[in-house]
Amino acid sequence: MKSPLPTLCIILAAGLSALPFVPAARPAAPPPRPEPHRSPIDLALLPDGKHALTANHTAHSVSLIDLDSGRAIAELPCEQRPSAVACSPDGKRVAVSNLWSGTVSLFVLAGARLAPAGTVAVGPLPRGLAFGADGRLFVAVSGADEIAILDFAAQKVTRRWAAPREPRQPVLSDDGKHLAVAGGRGGEVRLWELPAGKVAWSRKIEDAFNLRGLAFTPDGKALVCAHEIRRSFPVSKDNIDKGWVIDSRLTRLPLQANREKDQVALDRRGQAIGDPHGLAFAEEGRTLAVSGSGTQELLLFQFGALPWSSDPGDVLDAGLLFADRFRRVPTGGRPMTVAGRARANELVVANYLLDAVQIVDVRAGKVVKTIALGAPATAGLARQGEALFYDARRSHHQWFSCNTCHPDGHTSGQAFDTLNDGGYGNPKLTPSLRGVARTGPWTWHGWQKDLGEAVSFSYTQTMFGKGPTPTEVKAVLAYLATLDHPPSPHRTAGGGLTPAATRGQAVFEGKARCASCHKGPEFTSTRNHDVGLERDDSEYDTWSPPTLRSAWDRGPYLHDGRAATLQDVLTQWHSFEKLGGARLTPAELRDLIAYVKSL
């Protein structure tokens, strides 16, 4: 018997041919990506004085801007969270540091054409950049406390120098003989002699933190640094008003090692300067500009009239208020890096929250041009909360913002005596806010069970400003929910545990019994514990275990910052014998620390 299949195929083919043709459905196009905020966090002027570059922190890109026409003419992708941008003295090479990727993106520039040239791994949390005339690129690797020296042509790191804690912005002297960097968390400035890289000196600025703006003076004889000062008085409304909690200052450090440093107070009583950040000279060195990133302004000083003193007091010298020696230029948003344009009377400002670059006429004392880089049509709730977080005007007489103590949502490494433990007399280390929305209860003693209430408490009982509205609380909570931990550099290239960390995990979960308090995805606990520490004279006798995630980037440690390193924590005040665990061998301790650093 013949198979019926051929006949069946013919019948089916004939039937199908009679059907109308239906084209195959095309896959649905993906929805358009929402327009990102650019958030320019850093800016570099090209040697021609007509163009600028911005590192766009939340758009993961770099923009090339024509300052005269007032438009962005190119935008290229970088890696995660660019934090700084620099251009070589010949105007042909560009570098962007990528904070969360641990890399530097390299570009070549020809006219108005910006083209990618490669990417180089440099280490954890790279920030500021500086090009030398000899082709070297200096990178502040803040997560490793190093300066990495990168060969642009070879695309590799050739040397590493130890730097102060959390180095931010390296700067080069005009003659190319010196490099300097300030440690954001350690209060230290270091100077190297070039080209050899010999340390000329390291100087500590007493009680200084959040060291940001740094520049050589026009005569090349000193450095000027903008920063904040932590005072030891309780954080009360009266002490804030007197400038006895947090001051903003400039420090001048002579290059000659035998010359003493001196300072200038920046704050006016009743109208302080919040979060000084960028610093630059204009008008051939006659004007010094400092951005007040928290009070949304640019400060212009007659540099030769600054009353430098070893004891500057708590507020601005009254003599600066006369004859245009000090002016405040409103900018709005969050002014960050400032650069003096080739035209002697103009400054260029990267404004993070305005998603824009601004040009300021120094003589007129006003913003004369705002260049939009691109942003969503309306700011979402989290962006509104971010603006509140960085706004020092929400504190009493605008002395500080949330960002002052929690820079970029992390920690300043400073201890403050607030009411967060029920009274004064027990200063507490400022905790990191990374992952804070997932790690309740809050405060060192875990008494705060509602994060929204904690936000309101901070505005009214720590900053002593106007209480936030319910909508503002929701906005701040939305912003806090975006704060996350950067990838740990103590993992393998694929993101896994190293052999030492794998062994340490077994110790963590077993012999050391760390997991009894530090558990779950955030390595913390929802209840308080007796951790063997002495009482701190507050009404509480137990402690809320902090998350161990990002512990590698968080020192000092414990509630009062008494432990400089994780080893200090685990061998002195938080030893395993005190907590019911067993004594570890030196090898087990090393493996355990390797595991904690991997989290």
Image (tube, helix red, strand yellow):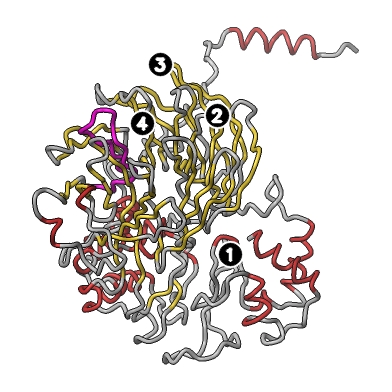
Q: CA distance from mark 4 to mark 1?
A: 36 Å
- Establish if 570 lies above or below 157: below
Nearer the observer: mark 1 or 3; the answer is 3
Query: Do labels 4 and 3 touch, CB within 8 Å?
Result: no
Whichever of callouts 2 and 1 sits on the residue coming sooner in the sequence is 2
In the rendered image, residue 105, in percent from the top left (x then y), is placed at 54, 33
- Establish if 421 lies above or below 248: below
**Local crowd at mark 1 within 10 Å, few (<14), some, or many (≥20)?**
many
Question: Do we see residue 330 in this rendering?
Answer: yes
Amino acid under label 4?
Leu
Whichever of callouts 3 and 2 sits on the residue coming sooner in the sequence is 3
What residue does disc 4 label? 45
Whichever of callouts 4 and 3 sits on the residue coming sooner in the sequence is 4
Amino acid under label 1?
Ala
Nearer the observer: mark 2 or 1; the answer is 2
Whichever of callouts 4 and 1 sits on the residue coming sooner in the sequence is 4
The residue under the point 70% across, 45% down is 494
In the rendered image, residue 558, in percent from the top left (x then y), is placed at 54, 76
Amino acid under label 2?
Gly
The residue under the point 39% across, 75% down is 416
Q: CA distance from mark 3 to mark 2?
A: 19 Å
Nearer the observer: mark 4 or 2; the answer is 2
What residue does disc 1 label? 551
Q: Which residues are magenta?
A: 333-351
The residue under the point 44% across, 43% down is 171
Q: CA distance from mark 2 to mark 1?
A: 36 Å
